[in-house]
Amino acid sequence: MKFLKDLKISVKLISTFAIISILMLCIGIVSAASMNKINKSSNSLYNDNVIAITSISYVDNNLLTIYSDLKLMLYTNDKNEIKKMEDEINKLTALDNKKLELYKSSFTRDEDRKLFGEFEQTLKEYRIIREDYIKLIMDGKKMKQ
């Protein structure tokens, strides 16, 4: 303790500020490294989850729009109106294909790939049936109510 009492006040102040500065520098370095980890994790979360959820939500909304167009086709007698709805369905289907490819690229688990494979197969079957349905409506073969 005698050593500290013998030091000049200026030396004591300078050494105290130097120690505090070194501690602040260490805290800054640790904080920067932690922020880098958080940034990587948030980017991963965004790419793996948010993009996938947005894509599949977009597809879901388009499928609902297609469903409503199909219902309207049944009750519309104007061939031009039916053709416009068919064009809209084809446009939405093309957009869905792009979103599904984006969704497919975001998988991280094998279980997700398996479930999506089942979904794709069901969607393929649905689209075939949908095309037959549209063809029947265009041919004027509607069921009587």
Image: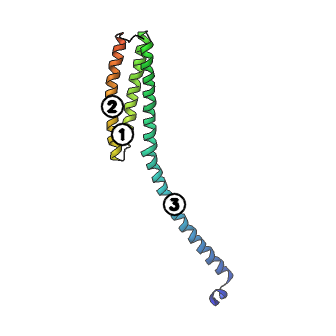
Question: What is the total number of numbered labels drawn onto the structure image?
Answer: 3
Q: Quadrant of the C terminus?
A: top left
Q: Which residue is mark 1?
A: 104
Q: Residue at x 45, y 17 (%)?
A: 72
Check disc 2 and report its element: helix, strand or loop. helix
Q: Residue at x 47, y 57 (%)?
A: 37
Quarter of the figure with residue 99: top left
Q: x, y percentage for residue 142?
A: 38, 12
Circle 3 residues within 10 Å: few <14, some 14–19, many ≥20: few
Disc 1 to disc 2, C-alpha distance: 16 Å
Q: Earlier in the sequence, mark 1 or mark 3?
A: 3
Circle 1 residues within 10 Å: few <14, some 14–19, many ≥20: some
Q: Residue at x 34, y 30 (%)?
A: 123
Taking the image as shown, residue 121 lies to the left or right of residue 57, namely left
Q: Amino acid at mark 3?
A: Ala
The circle on residue 122 is: 2
Q: Quadrant of the N terminus?
A: bottom right
Q: Which residue is mark 3?
A: 32
